[in-house]
Amino acid sequence: MDFRPLDDLAKKLAAAVPDGLQHLRADLEKNFRSVLQSGLAKLDLVTRQEFDVQAGVLKRTREKLEQLDARLAELERPDSIPTSVKKN
């Protein structure tokens, strides 16, 4: 995972610290980064690549399901029963 956005956010948070606490800035930045990473680690996130792969799998699955639905509808039509199966 790319932590640059977290680092940037931690720096921005540390920069927003009041002037009286600027001597703690480096410590706060480190703590902000740690809290952000910990919070994100608890979320069930996937990379963009993993998401795209799963979206492709889902698309193919839906297409196959549509094909099977169409085939089933065709087979369920009374006039589609093969002649060897029809009762005389």
Image (spheres, helix red, strand yellow):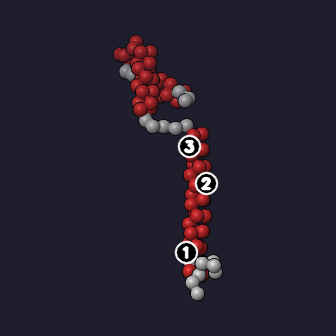
In front: label 3 or label 1? 1
Q: Position of residue 20 (x, y in %)?
A: 35, 16
Give the mark, 3 or 1, whose residue is nearer the N terminus: 3
70 is higher (above) or lower (below) than 12: below
Judged from this view, the residue extending furthest toward the left is: 20
Q: Position of residue 38 (x, y in %)?
A: 42, 27
Find residue 82 and report its image quarter: bottom right
Q: Position of residue 6 (x, y in %)?
A: 49, 28
With 63 as the anchor, is 26 left or right in this view? left
Residue drawn at (58%, 73%), measured in percent from left and top?
75
Q: Which residue position is annotated with label 3?
A: 51
At numbered mark 1, what does the secondary structure look like: helix, strand or loop? helix
At numbered mark 2, what does the secondary structure look like: helix, strand or loop? helix
Residue 38 visible, this angle: yes
Rounded to the nearest angstrom, the CA distance separating label 2 from label 1 is 24 Å
Give the mark, 3 or 2, whose residue is nearer the N terminus: 3
**Quarter of the figure that contains the N terminus:** top right
Q: Amino acid at mark 2?
A: Arg
